[in-house]
Amino acid sequence: MSVLRVTIWTLIGVLIAAMAFLAATIRVVEPGRAVAGNATRQDGARAPLVERALATTPRPQADPGPALTMPVVGADITRLRSNWGDARGGGTRVHQGFDIMAPGGTQVVAAADGTVEKLYYSNGGGGITLYERSDDGRWMYYYAHLGGYAPGVEQGRRVRAGDPIAYVGDTGNAGPGNYHLHFGIATMAPGERWWQGTPIDPYPLLAAGRQGR
């Protein structure tokens, strides 16, 4: 019995020693703890390699829209506010553009690179107007209530941002002496003509864009 008892206690001692050795050599990775080769999270913990790869993969950004130049020389966007959605025509319609007040004859410049697509006179609307399509065809820039066009401006002419294209006026339904530029932007679907498109508020794009030259 004494020999058997010694053998049993010997086996138990060997098992305890083996378990202690395994515990010392095997690393149990707890949630949020570091593993060799992993990336550090913002909270100081470590992220798995797969998460690291996803974090460094560029994600598609929403279209921020075109970078615009202030279309009225001398106007300061920081002193203006959006008038998109304001009531017009005694409340019968809403404003779909950005009115920039300026003295009659102030120079109007192209807000972005593009091509003059249409020169049009609307007696009961925008008066003397100019439609410019962006180079990629996705945007239409609308200049209305003009006093006239700059020399050499014609349909099909390529313009660059800051090029003179017209002058501030009060034509159309602006009202005599109410000199300002009505500047509009529309997003254009493939095949849409100059009078079509979906109007959007120009103010945020002007506020984020380049200031006039």
Image: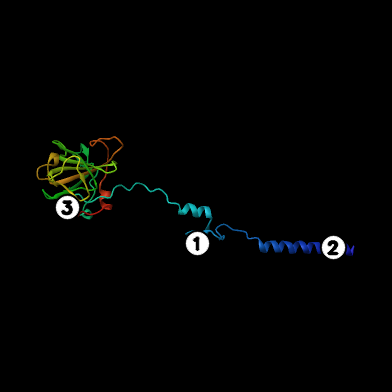
Looking at the rendered structure, which numbered label has been put on residue 73?
3
Mark 3 vs 2, N-terminal side: 2
Q: CA distance from mark 3 to mark 2?
A: 101 Å
Give the labeled residue for mark 1: 44
If you read the primary sequence from the N terminus, does the residue marked by circle 3 or circle 1 appear first?
Answer: 1
* Secondary structure of the residue carrying numbered label 2: helix
Numbered disc 1: secondary structure: loop
Give the residue type at disc 3. Answer: Val
Quarter of the picture holding the C terminus: bottom left
Marks 3/1: CA–CA distance: 51 Å
Instruction: Give SS at disc 3.
Output: loop
Q: Nearer the viewer, mark 3 or mark 2?
A: 3
Does residue 43 lie above or below 203 as drawn?
below
Label tally: 3
Q: Looking at the image, which is closer to me, 36 or 43? A: 36
| Residue 86 placement (x, y as % from top left) | 22, 43
Q: Nearer the viewer, residue 186 or 88?
A: 186
Which disc, if any, is residue 7? 2
* Circle 3 Cα neighbour tier, 10 Å, few/some/many (<14 / 14–19 / ≥20): some
Given the image, on which type of amino acid does mark 2 rest?
Answer: Thr
